[in-house]
Amino acid sequence: MSKEAVFTMKLESELRAEFMAEAEASHRPASQILRELMREFVQRQRQAREYEEFLRGKVASAREQIRAGEYASADDVEARSAARSSQLLAKAGSAGA
């Protein structure tokens, strides 16, 4: 990647001094560390945005299914859960015998 842009920022002198000391202790240029931090930030922001879009799509899909009447009632879910629990318990009981 070409390094043609200059980035100027203001920060507390104490923070700058601590950062520069840590950069020196890690034997890396401060600009390299800042580029890495920026890349990580950009990646995290993109992932968060993609996840938000994914969730919005799931919610929209669920709402559409509810509008279309394509859902199970709470009683149906409870009945299926109880039946599945019984099956698993019976299976676990026969496997241990």
Image (spheres, grey):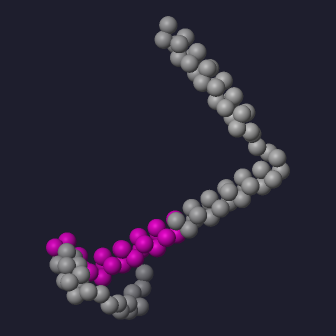
Q: Is residue 9 left or right of residue 49?
A: left
Name, please, the residue furthest toward the top.
97
Task: Using the image as rendered, state which of residue 73 and residue 35 is in the foreground.
Answer: 73
Screen quadrant of the N terminus: bottom left
Q: Residue at x 49, y 70 (%)?
A: 45
What secondary structure is the stretch in magenta mostly built from?
helix
Q: Is residue 23 left or right of residue 83?
A: left
Q: Is residue 29 above or below residue 26?
A: below
Q: Residue at x 52, y 69 (%)?
A: 46
Residue 23 % position (x, y): 22, 76
Residue 27 among those drawn in magenta:
yes
Q: Is residue 16 above or below residue 91?
A: below
Residue 63 % position (x, y): 74, 55
Q: Residue at x 46, y 73 (%)?
A: 42
Q: Is residue 44 left or right of residue 89?
A: left
> The magenta stretch spans which residues?
25-47
Task: Using the image as rendered, state which of residue 66 and residue 29 is in the foreground.
Answer: 66
